[in-house]
Amino acid sequence: MFARDTALAIAIATLAAIDGTAAQTANQPPDTMAARVEACTPCHGNKGEGTSDVYFPRLAGKPAGYLYNQLLAFRSGRRKYPPMNYLLEFLPDPYLEAMAEYFASEHPPLPQPAPSEVSKEVLAQGELLATSGDAGRNIPACVSCHGPGLTGMQPGIPGLLGLRAAYVSAQLGAWRYGTRTAKSPDCMQLVAGHLTEADVTAVAAWLATRPAPTNPAPVPKGTYALPFGCGSQPN
């Protein structure tokens, strides 16, 4: 009788331990990249689609190489924004690569373009610069680097769709004044340096009015030739 009672007690204790372990496991969050990047979602959206804040960009669907370069820039402090600098400070390269791949693989729909607050004349000037550039001022067209559909090119050129005018304007301003930089040759800084404030307003406004194309994915590397060397897009 004693042996049977002992065996029963051991069985009950074992089941209780198993049940406790299962309960503990059930209460743990899943160890996935989606769970790990939840710190990014208040600013960039659950799937990187962006939020209502005009100064936080969409990440979803951008080339992984581009996203990785930006994560490196924030980690090193080359791009300065304290919350991002702090979040990434101690993350190793493979982890940043995995984060970049995660957001690059997400493809939520692009938002509907917001109505523009600028005049038709300003929008026309923005369209001219974006699609044709201004050779007299050494300004290449946006489409010559970001693609005819403005969807970007693998591995390092981002698409320009789904972004608010205020964000695009802020980034062009950062390139112009050197507060945002990239690998040499820093092609965006060279281009932005030829833009006036009026150019920036016009280009940003026009880009924000662009509807989503049938296929918003960045095109494969080598689909078209860049007009000049760019450190972020190796040959």
Image (tube, rainbow, N blue to C red):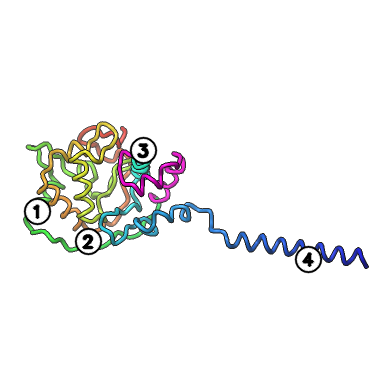
Tell me the distance, in whole angstroms, between the alpha carbons under discs 3 and 2: 34 Å
Q: Residue 80: within the magenta?
A: yes
Task: Give the image location of residue 34, x and y in percent.
Answer: 46, 55
Residue on which disc 2 sits: 113
Q: Residue at x 45, y 45 (%)?
A: 98
Tell me the distance, in whole angstroms, between the alpha carbons under discs 4 and 2: 63 Å
Q: Residues within 10 Å of mark 4 (few under 14, many from 20)?
A: few
Residue on which disc 4 sits: 12
Q: Tell me the element at label 4.
A: helix
**Residue 76: mark:** 3
Q: Tell me the element at label 3.
A: helix
Residue farthest toward the right in the current orientation of the protein? 1
The residue type indicated by label 2 comes to Pro
Res. 116 in view: yes
Q: Are marks 3 and 2 in contact (CB under 8 Å)?
A: no
With 163 as the anchor, is 136 left or right in this view?
A: left
Q: Residue 101: within the magenta?
A: yes
Residue on which disc 1 sits: 124
Q: Nearer the viewer, residue 113 or 74?
A: 74
Tell me the distance, in whole angstroms, between the alpha carbons under discs 3 and 4: 55 Å
The residue type indicated by label 4 comes to Ile
Mark closest to the chain's N terminus, 3 or 2: 3
Task: Give the image location of residue 45, x and y in percent.
Answer: 36, 58
